[in-house]
Amino acid sequence: MSTTPFQLETIAADYLASRLLPNQSASVGIILGTGLGQWVEDMDDFSAVDYKQIPGFARTNVQSHAGRLCAGKVQNTPVLALQGRFHLYEGYSPDDVCFGLRTLAILGVKTIVITNAAGALNPLFQAGEIMVITDQINLTGRNPLLGLRYGEPQFPDMSQLFSSRLADLAHSSALQQGQRLQQGVYMGILGPSLETPAETRMFRQLGADAIGMSTVMETIAAKQMGLEILGLSCLTNKNLPDCMAPTSLEEIIAVGQDIGQRLGDLLNALIPDIAASH
Ligand code: HPA
């Protein structure tokens, strides 16, 4: 067990600093979820290190997850990106799940854009839309700060987990491109099974607009490290309890790739705006 908080992440950050970011640092970091990772490869000055080469990184084994830590520039704005993430449902610990995010924070990232694939629960939303996350419900039963060995704050305030400032920027960047974003509450569950109709009804009644199996660990860890957070859910399917249709991972990935194109357009417009606003 590490004796000081983030010891392994600091080793990983030292390893990466010379390889990915010689003579510069990035203030914006991005986590790219299921089927959404393609976009990074179009960044200028693109470079990447496989997770398996980075000391301390867990091994990724889900088919759709490439597993690389990438650096590049979007209109001259340096960006660090996690292409692929680790999930609790794969058997990883909250520390494994948050390793990349914490490494980015140590590398100097101030803003983190966390993307995911999610199922829509709000009946007014459609599959194929992007939702700005306004708040979250962590229903995984896990917490990345368990053990109280991560330094201060030990009990981070969650009254504004997601930045409303960044949410406003996302809406205005999207509108400039003719995209309209939804907004709402993201529910994070453990998975890997999808929801029954009865669970879907319950989750909706609990106040969720979208549901997925990621993100809630990383947001809590990011808040603890003082990052400003923007969450974007790509709604790959829609779950209505009274007319549930079967959903498959293949379908989620296929729709995710389609939304991925629009997500990429949004990120290209948004990232320079975020960096300019720091
Ligand atoms: N449920 C849970 N996770 C998901 C879903 C869903 O419907 N779609 C994409 N990730």
Image (cartoon, rainbow, N blue to C red):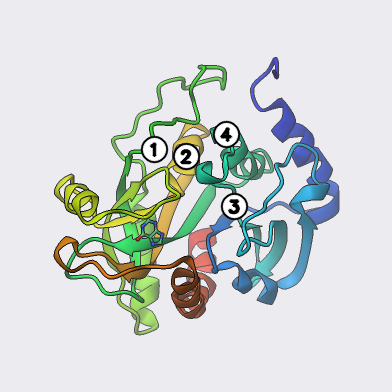
The residue that disc 2 covers is 217
Local secondary structure at mark 4:
loop
- Inspect the image, locate mark 1, and give the three-letter code of the amino acid beneath it: Thr
Are dots 2 and 4 in contact, CB under 8 Å? no
First in sequence: mark 2 vs mark 4: 4
Q: Specify few, some or many for label 4: CA neighbours under 10 Å numbering under 14, 14-19, or 20 or more.
A: some
Which quarter of the rendering shows the N terminus? top right
The residue that disc 4 covers is 93
Mark 2 or 1, closer to the camera: 1
First in sequence: mark 3 vs mark 2: 3
Q: Residue at x 69, y 73 (%)?
A: 41
Q: Residue furthest bottom?
A: 178
Local secondary structure at mark 3:
loop
Label 2 vs label 4: CA separation? 10 Å
Are dots 2 and 1 in contact, CB under 8 Å? yes
Compared to residue 138, the image places residue 255 above or below, namely below
Mark 3 or 4, closer to the camera: 4
The residue that disc 3 covers is 85
The residue that disc 1 covers is 140
- Inspect the image, locate mark 3, and give the three-letter code of the amino acid beneath it: Arg
Measured from the top left, where is residue 243 in percent x and y? 18, 69
Compared to residue 241, the image places residue 13 above or below, namely above
102 or 91: nearer the viewer? 91
First in sequence: mark 2 vs mark 1: 1
Label 3 vs label 4: CA separation? 12 Å
Label 1 vs label 3: CA separation? 17 Å
69 or 153: nearer the viewer? 69
First in sequence: mark 3 vs mark 4: 3
239 or 130: nearer the viewer? 239
Q: Quadrant of ligand 1?
A: bottom left
Label 3 vs label 2: CA separation? 11 Å
